[in-house]
Image (cartoon, rainbow, N blue to C red):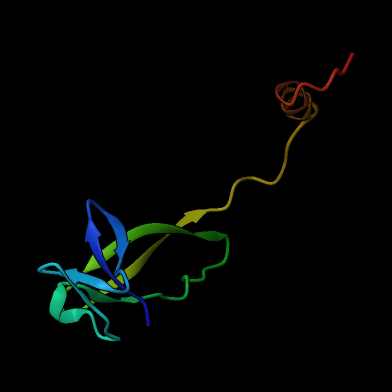
Amino acid sequence: MEYARLIQGALQDAPNPIRVGGEDIFTTDPTPYGYKPVLFTDPPEAEGMEPVFDGWEETETAIRQRWRLEPLPDPEADEADYRAALKRLGVDIS
């Protein structure tokens, strides 16, 4: 299991060893030192939607991965879209 702290929305993994009062603490349970288990979740599924990572949610006992669903982009593109994309890539299309 991974343990971490949530600092300004980002995970800070628990070090090994943990430095406390000038001493190195080797442990498989860093929760007494302010770290929580990280719970990775499966992304949700819905037709026509794609899951997008939406940060972390902290509770009293754990840090949980959060997702949101967004509509899939329209798969249809016209010739102008392709030409614009190639031009951005530096491909000469003359």
Quadrant of the rendered image containing residue 7: bottom left
Q: Is residue 84 above or below residue 28?
A: above
Which part of the image, by quadrant, shows the C terminus? top right
In depth, the one of 48 and 30 nearer the eye is 30
- Spot occupied by residue 72 in the image (x, y as percentages of width and height): 57, 52
When the figure is inspected, residue 72 is found, relative to residue 65, above or below; the finding is: above
Residue 33 shown left or right of residue 86 in the figure? left
**Camera-side residue: 62 or 72?**
62
Decide if residue 51 is on the left or right side of residue 86: left
> Residue drawn 26% across and 54% down?
9
Q: Is residue 5 above or below residue 83?
A: below
In the rendered image, is residue 16 in sight?
yes
Which residue is pictured at 41% across the width and 75% down the height?
Answer: 41
User: Where residue 66 sits: x, y (%)?
Assistant: 35, 65
- Kindly give the residue lying farthest to the left in the view shown: 21
Q: Quarter-wise, where is residue 63 in the image?
A: bottom left
Residue 60, visible in the rendered structure: no
Quadrant in which the N terminus is drawn = bottom left
- Residue at image x 87%, y 18%? 93
Q: Is residue 94 placed above or below 44 in the rendered structure? A: above
Q: Position of residue 61 (x, y in %)?
A: 18, 80
Of 80 and 40, which appears nearest the observer? 40
